[in-house]
Amino acid sequence: MNTRALLLFVCIYFSNNEVLSQETNLTIKIQEYLKCSKDEDCSFNAYCHFGRCTCKDGFLQYKETKKSPIQCFKEASHIEDYCEKDIQCQAALGKHSFCKFETTQNTVGKCNCHENAHYALNQCYKTAYIGGVCDVSDNCVIKSKNLKAFCEYSHCICPPMHHPTDDGTDCFPISELGGPCISNVGCSTLQAVCKEGTCQCKREYIPNFDNQTCLQVAKRLGDPCDEDGQCLEAHRFAICSNSSRVCECEEGAHVFDETCWRTAKLLEKCGNTFECRSDPHRGFGIECRNGTCLCKEGYQMEDRKDCVKWESRSIGIKNTYDLPIIVLLASLTLILRV
């Protein structure tokens, strides 16, 4: 064996023996701290049990380091209980609790939950808001004290018939039409929005007759419908046909320029020329004048039903309204002959 190898062997040998010696001495010292023959050999709130120091019931064993003697601290049972070490709180309140000291100089503190945890049912639970990850429902926290959020599939959710706020810190009821709301998601009815704190049908939709659904307003005659209201919203005097289920003019109304107008016949009251309609309707010689449907200039009433152009009529008495004109023509003829 050369000199270098011999020196290496000697170094390893003495090094290993030194480590073994240190570990052996440490073990002996630790055992000395644990061994006892009577209670007085143990620290405060500990007693000698089968030659080993053991903490009394309600106390927890604590060692600052492996070389430190056993210390026994009273186990905390509630939030705000006095403490000196974190283990006093965590034994009862869970791993999300700790012993909080007012200042660094204080040696006695109070059990508290960590900043990202909360106290519930005598435990400190990690706090999760709606949509956050959770282990149990007690992780889930919302502002409304009268409601309980749930942990489902490892995520916090609102209770049934409730929806979360945008930031997930609270749950609000889901409302039907006419119910209270704070945002659109709070309205359960399709095509409904939250307007002025109330669930209402959105633009171009109206509530049905029992205020349960939102129906689309018909834009023109012939559009599909379920109720008259869909047609009336855009067209006065329109109804939803029971047979075809499309919007059409009601009885007593007629179509003009894709709009329903109340039908007013000759000599009947009117508010607009489009309302006036002769019977049968053979032209546009009728108008609303001074609040009454009358024949236009150049048209003559026939049978109190229709207006026809004067030059298209043959000479002949059709009704008593023709008599003055016939008499005038006859008088002119006699004058000319003379």
Image: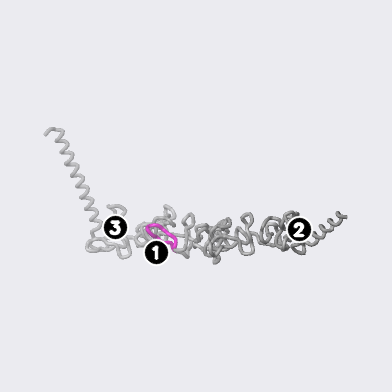
Q: Nearer the viewer, mark 2 or mark 3?
A: 2
Q: Secondary structure at mark 1?
A: loop
**Mark before the other along the chain sequence, 3 or 1:** 3
In reply to whether residue 74 is colored magenta, the answer given is no
Give the residue drawn at x 44%, y 59%. 141
Q: Is 98 positioned to the left or the right of 187 in the image?
A: left
Separation of marks 3 and 1 at Cα, in angstroms: 28 Å
**Mark before the other along the chain sequence, 2 or 3:** 3
Give the residue drawn at x 46%, y 60%. 142
Q: Secondary structure at mark 3?
A: loop
Q: Secondary structure at mark 2?
A: loop
| Amino acid of disc 2 | Ile
Q: Nearer the viewer, mark 3 or mark 1?
A: 1
Disc number for residue 122 = 1
What residue span does the magenta drawing correspond to? 148-159
Task: List x then y, in percent, for residue 32.
Answer: 23, 56
Nearest the eye: 80 or 208: 208
10 Å crowding of disc 2: few (<14), some (14-19), many (20+)? few
Residue to which mark 3 is pinned: 70
Marker count (numbered): 3
| Amino acid of disc 1 | Asn
10 Å crowding of disc 1: few (<14), some (14-19), many (20+)? few
Residue to which mark 2 is pinned: 315
In reply to whether residue 149 is colored magenta, the answer given is yes
